[in-house]
């Protein structure tokens, strides 16, 4: 069998790597084909396409006797550059195991995320160093920031801390932007690093510091849309309600089964509902009913293309930026109470021990009888009377069984609490609190997990040959071993252990650790580090399972209003239920990759909005002191989370008094070079709010020892008298 080429981008990278390995002698297309294992005609054509693309981009040159060579030879590499706070960068090569350090004086015209060509220049120890020769591809060409007047000229300072250079704005390309405005600029041509990069203002958002302006700036910074195009809005307004007699006749009618929704009290897009009834055989029928977005949003329509591009709804501190226009997300598709709705359902027959005795998937028409807020459902679980009390308590009992079984099978219990803000009428933060998950949340979560797992399992069994048909899975890889070791060391510093004899034991060991620290002062930091040790879940057509949930098969079926992969899952499931042929794997994988990337950008934007509000909250508290706990350590500083309000800031290593401090990455500790004083994750500190930079959304702390010794015991201690060097317990 000939080796099957990978996707075009990966194939081009494989070809380029082979050409680079050939050095100055070069390599012919025939030698390339043999080396890469491409034997068939189709494979050869793809190889020629890759070569042609590389030639057009200037990454490959055609040499003598039909040989291809890479400019620069063996001493150059390509990769994406990550800029750090000092202005230096790391160029990620391949999987990131051979990163090349680039000093800030050698970054050239590269900006964070750009794909660059780097000349290798030796290095120190095992760390390779290099110099950016040129930018091959800009990751982004639009930037958002604040306009400042400097020496009579306008500049824009980007909000993104990783963009170190200010942009010069020519007067005739400023759109009348004024000093103190937030604006979006388009990067102009920039070839010489000695010159300032030039930008053209494309949109003035408003005055920096105004709540709505800052939220729009965050969306723009992460490349997220501020509004829907007029064509999409118009198309959505023209969609008619799909609940017609003709459509109902095609579907399973579950409108008479007791059905309810449980959501946050301010939610407007209700995309899931649960139904429950007792069957004649004594078993329970539980229906997971999901909004049938696929009925309203058809492939390649203008709404579908916009949704595919957005890939997800975005949740900032004060607003939702929806994936679908409001007519769909809050009206036609939302499972509002006392209204007939089109749905796609997973219906299970369960016994009293929540074991599956039967299942059915398909399109339905349903009607929610009651909308619950989480607090209302929780009150019933806690013993209060209310509507549908029996149904809520039954679903709660079955969910508890499912949850217990899932955890016994190795699922991780790492769900963290959300930071929320109380905002005044102008959007200013007047309070910070944590939104705590409880049994009512778990009730919904367990049945959504069940539906996601069983849909993926069903599709994976529809084999026509050796492999399952192409599908969209939600996958989660094994954790990073190095980060697991950091978690082990942190646990040990608090007197806990993380004992693992084999990979399969790790989830159980982490769960035991989390149970040990529950309710203790170190709980939050250990939970944070446990989360950081995990890989990121992504979408993929390659089913490697979901490590964190301990599921062999898993997908996202339950939120098509706010996640585009769920819409793809609905379409694929309907297609395979109807006996359809295998879908295009490559097209699905492209959507998976894009959706995973957009999901990360949305999460980054959400965190940025939280950081902004935290900074704004602390701006009025400069000079005040708070108790906190070390939440992060880096080469440049110590990050501290304040206990009282969960806000985070940083103490620069150079600002620590009494010694020169360095970060020891191997031991994951900051150490004083003369005194030996140590700072570890989880250590308690007292800090003073020193400064707040609203443009950068950063908070600077100063260490406020006050005669106190840093410990990992969860308590502050006085320094022992007569000792010059502080010790640790």
Image: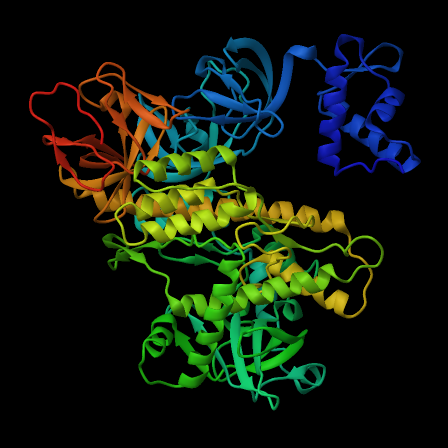
Where's residue 675, x and y in %? 21, 17
Farthest residue, direction front = 501
Where's residue 207, x and y in %? 32, 43
Q: Which of 467 and 204 is in front in this view?
A: 467
The answer to whether residue 561 is above or below residue 54 is below
- Image point 54% across, 13% down: which residue? 131
**Quadrant of the image for the C terminus?**
top left
Exactly how many numbered labels are in the figure? 0
Say if residue 452 shows up in the picture.
yes
The answer to whether residue 225 is above or below residue 176 is below
Say if residue 298 shows up in the picture.
no
Q: In terms of image quadrants, where is residue 354?
A: bottom right
Q: Which of 339 and 241 is in front in this view?
A: 339
- Image point 20% across, 36% down: which residue? 685
**Quadrant of the image for the N terminus?**
top right
Where's residue 672, x and y in %? 26, 19
Where's residue 91, x and y in %? 54, 23
Taking 39 as reference, is 111 left or right?
left
Farthest residue, direction bottom = 280
Snapshot colouring? rainbow
The answer to whether residue 261 is above or below residue 313 is below
Taking 659 as reference, is 480 left or right?
right
Q: Which of 678 and 79 is in front in this view?
A: 678
Q: Nearer the viewer, residue 265 or 626?
A: 626
Farthest residue, direction right = 41
């Amino acid at each position: 069998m000939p080796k099957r080429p990978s996707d075009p981008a990966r194939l081009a990278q494989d070809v380029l790597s082979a050409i680079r390995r050939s050095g100055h002698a070069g390599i012919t297309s025939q030698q390339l084909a043999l080396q890469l294992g491409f034997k068939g005609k189709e494979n050869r054509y793809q190889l020629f396409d890759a070569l042609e693309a590389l030639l057009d981009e200037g990454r490959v040159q055609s040499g003598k006797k039909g040989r291809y060579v890479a400019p620069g030879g063996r001493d150059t590499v390509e990769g994406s550059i990550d800029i750090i706070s000092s202005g230096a960068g790391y160029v990620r090569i391949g999987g990131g195991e051979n990163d090349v350090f680039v000093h800030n004086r050698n970054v050239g015209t590269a900006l964070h995320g750009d794909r660059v060509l780097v000349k290798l220049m030796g290095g120190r120890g095992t760390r390779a160093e290099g110099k950016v020769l040129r930018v091959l591809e800009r990751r982004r060409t639009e930037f958002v920031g604040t306009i400042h007047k400097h020496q009579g000229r306008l500049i824009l300072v980007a909000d993104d801390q990783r963009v170190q250079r200010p942009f010069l704005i020519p007067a005739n390309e400023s759109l009348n932007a004024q000093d103190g405005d937030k604006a979006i600029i388009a990067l102009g041509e920039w070839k010489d690093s000695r010159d300032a990069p030039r930008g053209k203002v494309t949109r003035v958002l408003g005055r920096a510091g105004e709540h709505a302006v800052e939220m729009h700036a965050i969306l723009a910074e992460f490349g997220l849309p501020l509004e829907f195009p007029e064509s999409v809005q118009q198309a959505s307004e023209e969609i008619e309600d799909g609940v017609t007699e003709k459509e109902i006749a095609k579907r399973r009618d579950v409108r008479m089964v007791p059905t309810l929704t449980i959501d946050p009290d301010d939610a407007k897009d209700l995309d899931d509902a649960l139904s429950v009834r007792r069957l004649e055989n004594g078993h329970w029928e539980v229906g997971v009913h999901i909004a049938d977005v696929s009925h309203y949003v058809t492939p390649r329509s203008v709404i579908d293309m916009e949704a595919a591009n957005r890939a997800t709804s975005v949740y900032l501190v004060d607003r939702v930026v929806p994936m679908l226009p409001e007519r769909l997300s809050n009206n036609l598709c939302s499972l509002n109470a006392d209204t007939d709705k089109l749905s796609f359902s997973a219906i299970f027959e369960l016994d009293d021990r929540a074991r599956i005795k039967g299942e059915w998937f398909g399109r339905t028409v349903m009607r929610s009888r009651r909308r619950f807020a989480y607090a209302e459902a929780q009150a019933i679980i806690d013993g209060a009377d209310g509507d549908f009390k029996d149904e809520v308590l039954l679903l709660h009992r079955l969910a508890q069984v499912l949850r217990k079984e899932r955890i016994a099978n190795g699922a991780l219990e790492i769900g963290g609490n959300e930071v929320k803000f109380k905002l005044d009428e102008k959007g200013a933060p007047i309070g910070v609190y944590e939104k705590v998950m409880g049994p009512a949340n778990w009730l919904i979560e367990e049945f959504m997990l069940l539906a996601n797992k069983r849909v993926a399992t069903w599709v994976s069994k529809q084999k026509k040959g050796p492999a399952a048909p192409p599908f969209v899975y939600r996958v989660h890889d094994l954790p990073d071993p190095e980060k697991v070791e950091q978690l082990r060391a942190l646990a040990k510093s608090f007197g806990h252990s993380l004992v693992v004899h084999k990979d399969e034991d790790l989830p159980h060991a982490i769960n035991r650790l989390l149970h040990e620290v529950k309710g203790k002062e170190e709980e939050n930091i250990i939970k944070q580090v446990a989360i950081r040790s995990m890989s990121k879940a992504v979408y993929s057509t390659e089913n490697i399972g979901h490590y964190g949930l301990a599921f062999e098969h898993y997908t996202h079926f339950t939120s098509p209003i706010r996640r585009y992969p769920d819409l793809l899952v609905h379409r694929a499931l309907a297609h395979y239920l109807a006996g359809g042929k295998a879908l295009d794997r490559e097209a699905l994988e492209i959507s998976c990759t894009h959706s995973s990337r957009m999901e990360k950008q949305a999460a980054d934007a959400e965190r940025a909005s939280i950081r902004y509000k935290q900074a704004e909250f602390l701006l009025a508290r400069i000079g005040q002191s708070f108790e906190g706990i070390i939440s992060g350590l880096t080469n440049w500083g110590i990050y501290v989370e304040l206990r009282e309000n969960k806000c985070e800031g940083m103490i620069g290593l150079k600002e620590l008094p009494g010694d020169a401090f360095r970060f020891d990455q191997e031991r994951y500790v900051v150490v004083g070079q003369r005194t030996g004083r140590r700072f570890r994750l989880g250590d308690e500190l007292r800090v003073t709010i020193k400064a707040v930079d609203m443009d950068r959304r950063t908070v600077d702390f100063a260490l406020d020892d006050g005669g106190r010794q840093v410990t990992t015991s969860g308590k502050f201690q006085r320094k022992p008298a007569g000792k010059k060097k502080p010790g640790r317990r």
